[in-house]
Every structure is written in structure tokens, then in C-alpha cells.
Amino acid sequence: MDAVVISRTRRRIATSDAHNGRNCWDYRLHRARPPLQSRLRGVVFSNGVQQFKLGLPYLAGLATLDAEWRSLRPEDAPNAHWDWPALMRHARDRFSLLDGDGNVIGLWCSGASSPRKYENGAWYRLDFMEVRPDRRESSIGAAMVAAIGARAIEMSATGIIIESLPESAPFWRRLGATERTMDGWRPGRDLLPFVVETDLLNTLKEVFDEGRAQASSKSEGPHPR
């Protein structure tokens, strides 16, 4: 299963029906937090097959997208009731992934304003991530993770910590993430801990930079003689 969905803790999954029996927080009751600045927004990159662009999700336009994505998710999906407008209002770091036609095909966010200090390192906390449900190809998920790696390094992180839904664990294993905890950090109940170590993080950044160079060369086209 190539579903690319994770959460920091099930208790904080934002739902449209916050009182459905789970101990969920309704993030819509909170004022939107200002997004962190990033030079990566607007960057175009390629994975060799298709081009992508990083953007800033606009909260006013997320309601329509969220309704569409909900209709595309299986009813029994672990993230069936995710509420992206609510999640993004809470997040400090938020990004969208667009395809070559400008359609949003991926979202990710983090509620942390800076990397967390564990094990003599600084760890970017990836809280929520999803590829558009009808576009869950591993190549799109991998491209988005490469961009996340670049963002983590932009924030001076030495790695990434992920609390994965069990259904997404095969995806992180294929990417080479390490399944482990660390001092001071444990996953929430029913979630699995994955860590993108420094070597893998640097590799992701290299992949992203190569993708930027490919996209740039394609946009320039052949030079006249």
C-alpha cells in the first residue's frame, strides 16, 4: 500500500466530528498560526518523470480540496476524517506539492516552529503528510519526502522524526528510514517510530537538488547556435 499518511498522535487527529468517541482536538477552535518562511516555496523540481512545485497552502481554498480528498479516501482508512484546513491552521510549517498543471497532489505540515533536540541532534518533526488519495504513487510520495528533507536541512535539522500509521510503515522502510525510538521521543499509541538519519537526510537533499537542476534545464530548453 502506497498510502503516504502519518500523524504525530491519534489523539490529535483533527476531525470534522471532534466528539465521535475519540479524544480528538478540534483545531478549528484555534486561530490560525502564521506559517514559517521558506525559500523553497515556489521551487520547481523533477523526479525524472514529472515536475513538481512547492507552495504554501492557502487556508481559504483548503475546504474544497479537503472535501474532495475525503470523498476519495476509503471509508475504513485510518485518516478518513482528517481535516486539512484544521490541521494547517494549527501548523507552523506547512507546504503543498503541486503537479505540472498546478493541481495540489500532496500536503505536509509540522506544528513545531523549530527542530527538536534529541540525541545530540536537531530533528524536524513531520506531523502530517498525505498524497492525494487517487494519486498515491510511490514516486510522488518519494518526491515529496525529498522536498521535506530539503526543508529539514533549510531549518538546520540533522534528521527527521516520524510517527507513522502502521499502513504507511512499508513506505518508510522502502525509503530507508530507521524504525526506532530515541531518548526523549516515543511514538503515540498505535503508531510506529521512524527516523530519517543524517546520511539519508543528506541523500534526500541531493535528490531534491538534482531534481531542481533537471527542472531548470528543461525550462531553459536548447540554446540556439
Image (cartoon, helix red, strand yellow):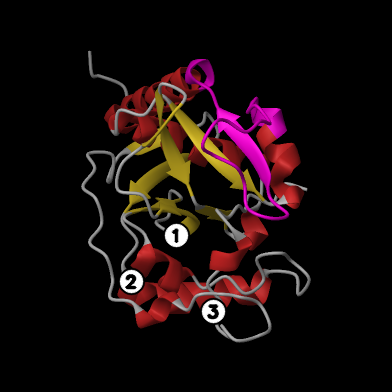
Residue beneath label 1, please?
103
Residue 41 at what x, y percent from top left?
Answer: 28, 45
Q: Is residue 78 magenta?
A: no
Dominant secondary structure (helix, strand or loop) of the stretch shown in magenta: loop
Q: CA separation, marks 1 and 3?
A: 15 Å
- Residue under pointer 3: 67
- First to last magenta residue range: 173-200
Q: Secondary structure at mark 1?
A: loop
Circle number at residue 59: 2
The CA span between labels 1 and 2 is 15 Å
Q: Nearer the viewer, mark 1 or mark 3?
A: 3
The percent coordinates of residue 165 (x first, y second) are 69, 52
Which residue is drawn at the image coordinates 33% and 77% (left, top)?
30
Q: Secondary structure at mark 2?
A: helix
* Residue kind at label 2, given as amino acid type: Leu
**Disc sitting over residue 32 in the figure:** none
Q: Mark 1–mark 2 contact, CB under 8 Å?
A: no
Q: Identity of the amino acid at label 3?
A: Ala
Residue 153 percent coordinates (x, y): 35, 28
Does label 2 or label 3 sit earlier along the sequence?
A: 2
The image quarter containing residue 27 is bottom left
The answer to whether residue 140 of the structure is visible from this angle is: no
Q: Foreground residue, 178 or 205?
A: 178
